[in-house]
Image (spheres, rainbow, N blue to C red):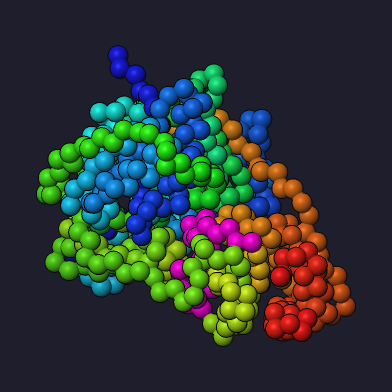
Amino acid sequence: MMKIIVCIKEVIDPNLAATSLEFDSVSNKVVPLPGVWLVINPLDERALEAALRIKDAHDGEITVITLGVNLDRHVLRKPMAIGPDELILLEDEAFAEGDSWSTAYALAMAIKKIGNYDLIFCGRQAADWDAGQVGLGVAEILGLPSITVAKKIDITDGKARVERVTDDGHEVVEVTLPALITVGEEIGELRSPTMAGMIAAKKKGAIIWKPADIGVEPSQIGTTGRRLKLVKLFQPVHEGKCEIIESETPEEAAISLFQRLKEAKILK
Amino acid sequence: MAEYKNVIVCCEVKEGKLTPITTELLSCGKRLSDDLGEELGAVLVGSNVTDFAKEAIAFGAHKVYVIDDSLLADYQTDSYVLVMEKLAKQLMPRIILLGQTSTGRELAPKLAFRLGTAAALDCVELAIDPESRLLLQTKPVWGGNALGTFICESYPQIATVRAKTMSPLERDDSRQGEVIAIDASLDSSAIRTKVLEKVPEEVRGIKLEDAKVIVSGGRGIGSAEGFKQLEELAKILNGAVGASTPPCDNGWVPFGARIGLTGKTVTPDLYIAVAISGSSQHMSGCSGAKNIVAINKDANANIFKVAHFGVVGDWKKVLPIFTEKIKEFLAGYG
């Protein structure tokens, strides 16, 4: 039986970033306006989809693990409704505001405590800080081979055959399990939960682990453990204004747009 | 105690020469090493790569470290991290720069974790802080809605750089430099992955990264059929077709057409965004375009905040006429 672990992160809905977040360049903090909600990091949802496909094809068990503070239990219901068997929360103030190192370290220590696994899936980056390193860091700390940006995975006889995206196409890579795999958009969207799944998820509990439970060095987790420090947070100033081509009908707008671009020598 | 000094750049080679991002990195590295009063080194890792050392020198490197071994023919994390780890421990560079490429975005974090330091990926700006002499690493965060500047107080400081954000220096073949061959000393058993096959993507016509004109579509195109109209316009303009994420998820276009933060970065002269809302994740991939034209029926769409020209209207009514006018113009009638 395949034992699969999926690492997920709760983030503020990325669709809200343009309208409902303030980036305070004095305090270097992100200030959410009232009413923002959390979602599962979209690429971590896709990591879960990758895990579910393996579970569909082979006999498998999925453990979802997430690290954070004041984790929103509602948000966790959707992933738990779709197929995972177990949910582990690394929930403690001490884990908060970490960087890729301190987060990967905590996740890796938790996974060490879980013990046996064949595959670990992670999204390639989180929609908040876009660091793109935790998956690779977990693999490095656990001494596992890693394959990134997988778009298709087949398992045979303890080996994964992975199609991964490259800059000019894709390549097929083979690795003996256990291994860690990260995914991007190319793997596909997470399937929708059923009503029955959502109801069952409501009843599913979660295992909560604190720093002491997973044997981490306090100085290496959360904000204290950061190796990369944020010194400035700001929004680029956008110069220029969009020239809206006004007209009575869309067809006339098309003609005016063409003429405007010709006039500006953009169309030659 | 020995000091960390100098900047090194990891070079990538394609089609018989240094890749464009490599030349951009070398110029960025030169600027940083000049600011530090230190030297720029280039690193060539691969098989049969020794000949490219001259090119690295022509683009600014004082020294080129060549690690040439048949086991390094294909990039694989294990082998490349091992050789870079050994090199970093030997040279003790202050800064290591890589491209934000398929290789760099894997190698940089793995190397940082291996060496007990940190990396920042997808940097769009790099500078030396005059007081601390630390590398100020600026990269997009929050889906490209903001920029964050980071520092790392451990060495080496490692950063990957986004393509087309740093201009390459002029190539100067009269520049002199030293080429140092380094033994890979690799044990093939240390390489835990195996590359079975490499499949180049099928590109009909111009590659997105090279196109001077791109016609790009979003969720509002509605179908693969709809994209045919964009293809027609792109063809007339000698351009390429791009897309945001939803058309790719829906299978209307291949993922290779995807432009964005985790997709392709393009810098065409003309970017025509058809039925694209203009999320920052998408705009991160095309904000370098010289002229952005947007057609969208939602007047409040974010695209109108970043485009240069816009039409608020239904693309199904606007695009055919627009295409027709361009056809006439190029045929000599307009």
Quarter holding the N terminus of chain A is: bottom left
- Which corner quadrant of the image does residue B220 belong to? bottom right
Residue A72 makes an appearance in the image: no
Looking at the image, residue A223 sits to the left or right of residue A215; the answer is right
- Which corner quadrant of the image does residue B199 belong to? bottom left
The percent coordinates of residue B162 (x first, y second) are 49, 48
Residue A170 makes an appearance in the image: yes
Principal secondary structure, stretch drawn in magenta: loop
Looking at the image, residue A193 sits to the left or right of residue B196; the answer is right
The percent coordinates of residue B310 (x first, y second) are 76, 66
Does A203 appear in magenta? Answer: no
In the image, is residue B68 above or below residue A149? Answer: above
In the image, is residue B44 above or below residue B234? Answer: above
The percent coordinates of residue A31 (x first, y second) are 64, 40
Magenta highlight range: B247-269
Looking at the image, residue B145 sits to the left or right of residue A220; the answer is right
In the image, is residue A198 above or below residue B253? Answer: above
- In the picture as drawn, the residue positioned furthest to the right comes out as A248
Identity of the residue drawn at 60% across and 82% down: B232
